[in-house]
Image (cartoon, rainbow, N blue to C red):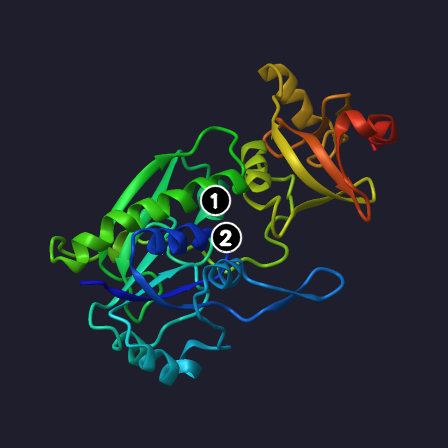
Amino acid sequence: MIVSILFMGTPEFAVPCFHMLLEEGYDVVGAVTQPDRPKGRGGKLAVPPVKEAALAAGVRVLQPERPGDAYDEFAALGADLIVTAAYGGILRKRLLALPRKGTVNVHASLLPRYRGPSPIHMALLNGDRETGVTTMLTDAGIDTGAVLLSEAMPIPEGMYFQELHDRLAVLGAEVLKKTLPLWLGGGIRPRPQDDAAATRAPILTKDAGNLDFSLGAERLANTVRAFSLWPGAAVTLCGKRLKVHRAHVGCGGPPSLAASAAAAPANVPGMVAAVTRDALSVLCGDHRTLEITELQFENGKKMKIAECWHNLQWMKSG
C-alpha cells in the first residue's frame, strides 16, 4: 500500500527530507511552504527552497499565510500522514486531526533539548559537543510531542552554523527514512518527553549576534560560530561597525599578564590589543582575546585580515 503524505517545510534544512520521501516511493500529494517573502536590500521576493524543490518534482505547492487558512484544501488532499520539517508555522488541533496516521516532525536537536525554531544556533552558542535529530509526533505544543526516534552526532570543534546545518539536514532525512516504516507499520512506541529537562531555542532577533566584550572569549567565539551567517555577528570597534565572520579564542598569557591586564585602566574589554596579518585581537572580559580572522566593514566585502591589515593598524590601542 502506497502511503500518501502532505509535506510541510520551508528552508534548505527541509529539502533532503522532501527528496527522501519521493525517492522512497511515498505519494507526496502536496508541499506546503511559507509564502514568498521580500529579501535583501532590494526587497525582491525570495522563493522558499522547498517550493523550488517541489516545482522541480512536479508536486503541488500550497503557500497559505497561515496553515489554518488552507484547511479545506488540506482535507481534500486526503493525506494519510503529514510530515513537517522546519515549516515555520504552528499547526492547530483541527489540522492535526486530519491525517489518520498523525503528523511526524523532524527537529534538529535531541529533544527535549532546544525546543523551538533555533536549535542549531543554540547548540553552537552554548558550546555543545553533541547535537542530533529527533523525529516526533506533533501535538498542540511547540516541539513537545512524543519522540519516535533520535540520533546523535558530534559537533567538531570550530564548526560554524552552515556546515552543522547541512550535516543535520542530511541526518534528518536519514532518521525520517528509518522512522516512517516503523511508525506506519506499528513497530515503534512513542516516548513522552521529559518536560522538566526541556530547554528553549527562541526566535532570533536581529541583535542576537552583537558581541559584548565584557563576556569571555569562548562565549564570543561561539556567538560568531552560531550567528555569523544570520543575523550576523557584529561589533563597533574604535567607532567602526564591523561584521565578524570568523574568529577564535586567543589567550591571556601567563597569570601575571592577566593580573596586570585586569589592573591597568587602559586594558578594558573591547580594546584592540594587537593587529597582525593573521588576526585582529580584541581583549575580552576574561582577559583572553578574541582573534578575529575574517571581517566586513559596513558596505564593504568580506575579507580576511591579511587583505586589510594595513588599514587596521590605527585601531591598535584605539
Position in image of residue 297 (x %, y %)? 80, 42
Q: CA distance from mark 1 to mark 2?
A: 9 Å
Name the residue furthest front.
Answer: 58
* Lateral position of residue 304 relative to residue 182, left or right: right
Measured as percent of width and height from the top left, residue 8 is found at: 40, 65
Residue at position x 44%, y 63% in the image: 87
Crowd around label 2: few <14 · some 14–19 · many ≥20 (10 Å): some
* Residue 82 in which image quadrant: bottom left
Q: Quadrant of the C terminus?
A: top right
Q: Which residue is mark 1?
A: 165
Q: Tell me where residue 80 appears, x and y as whole percent.
A: 24, 70
Drawn side of residue 75 relative to residue 285, left or right:
left
Q: Secondary structure at mark 2?
A: helix
Task: Determine the residue located farthest toward the bottom in the rendered image.
Answer: 72
> Pointer 1 and pointer 2: residues touching (CB < 8 Å)?
yes
Q: Which of the two labelled residues, at mark 1 and mark 2, occupies the earlier sequence position?
A: 2
Please tell me which residue lies in front, 220 or 193.
Answer: 193
Q: Amino acid type of disc 1?
A: His
Q: Report the quarter where the N terminus lies.
A: bottom left
Relative to residue 21, is residue 130 depicted above or below?
above
Q: Which residue is mark 2?
A: 12
Q: Is residue 51 visible?
A: yes
